[in-house]
Image: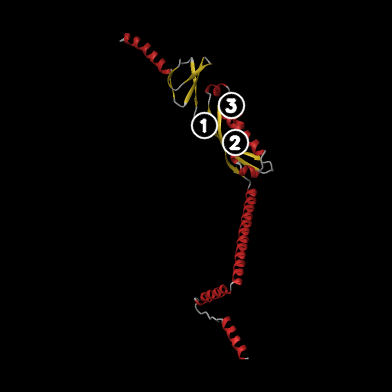
Amino acid sequence: MMLNQIVLAPVAAILLYILAGIRVIKQYERAVKFRLGKFVGILQPGLKWIIPIVDRIEKVDLRVVTVDIPAQEVISKDNVPMKVNGVVFFKVTNADKAILEVEQYKFAISQLSQSALRDMAGKSDLDTILAKREEIGEKIRTIVDIETDPWGIKVTDVKIKDIELPDNMKRAMAHQAEAERDRRARIILAEAEEQAAQRLANAGDIIDKSPAALKLRLYQTLAEIASEKNSTIVFPFPEEMMEFLQNKKEQKK
C-alpha cells in the first residue's frame, strides 16, 4: 500500500504540472508569449502548452472593439460651451506591438480620442459641429489612427454621439427654427397667391376676348347660387334682347 502511494505521487505531480501548462487560444485571439519575462513569440488559436512558472502569456482580442469617449466640456470656435461625447471603433492588427509598445492600449486610445475630440470641437463653430458630425468624426479617426499605428492598432471609425447645449442656447435655437418655419410658410403663401393672381389674370384676358365665355361663366355662377336654399336670384335681362329692341325702336322712327 505504501509502495503504491509512493509510485502514484510523482505521477499525480507530473499530471498536475502538465495540466497547469495547458492553454486554449480562441479563434479571434492571439497570445503573446513570454519566457522568464522575455518575448518569445505569438501563439496561434488552438490548444497550447506552456511551461508553468517559466512561461506566461497575454491574450489579445483581434475583433473590432468599441471604446466610449466620455462627455467632454468644450468651447466651440464661436465661444459656445457644450458637452460632446462619442465612440471609437478599433482593432488590433499586431498583437505583440499592442502589448510591448504601450501599457493598457484601450485606456491609451480613450485618452487620445478625448484629446482629439476637444481639439476638433474647439476649432469648429457650433453650426459645423451640428451639421458635419461625420466629417469631424473622420478627422478625429485620422488623428487617433496615426498616433496608434506604432502600437499595431487600426482605428476603423469614430462617431460623435451626443451634443449637449446650455438651456439658453437651446431656447435660442428653438426660436430661430420657429422663425425660419414662419418665413418659409410666408414665402410659400406669397408664391401661391402670386400663382393664383396670374391665373385669374389669364382667365380675365380669355373672358375679355370671348363674350360667350363671359356669359357661360355668368350662367355657371347663377347655377351655383340657385343650388343654395333660401336664395333670391335677380336674373339680368339678356344683352341681345336689349340690342334687338333698340334696333326695332330705331326702325320705327
Q: How far is the residue under mark 1 from the one under mark 3?
A: 16 Å
Q: Is residue 9 above or below residue 32?
A: above
In the depicted structure, whether residue 24 falls above or below residue 162? above
| Corner quadrant of residue 114 | top right
Of the 4 image quadrants, the one containing the C terminus is bottom right
Quadrant of the rendered image containing residue 13: top left
Q: Check residue 149 in the rendering and tell me which mark sits there, or answer none.
A: 3
Q: Nearer the viewer, residue 183 or 80?
A: 183
Instruction: Pick whichever of labels 1 and 3 is earlier in the sequence.
Output: 1
For mark 2, does the 10 Å Cα neighbourhood hold few (<14), some (14 to 19), or many (20 or more) residues? some
Q: Residues within 10 Å of mark 1 (few under 14, many from 20)?
A: some
Amino acid type at image mark 2: Glu
- Residue position marked by numbered label 2 in the rendering: 138
Residue on which the image places disc 1: 65
Q: Secondary structure at mark 2?
A: helix
Q: Amino acid at mark 3?
A: Asp
Give the answer, above or below, for where 250 lies relative to 101: below
- Residue 192, given in percent of the width and then of the height, sits at 60, 61
Mark 1: amino acid: Val
Name the residue at the bottom extreme: 253
Outermost residue, right side: 78
Q: Is residue 29 shown left or right of residue 242?
A: left
Q: Residue 23: x and y, percent?
A: 43, 21
Count of numbered badges drawn on the protein: 3
Q: Secondary structure at mark 3?
A: helix
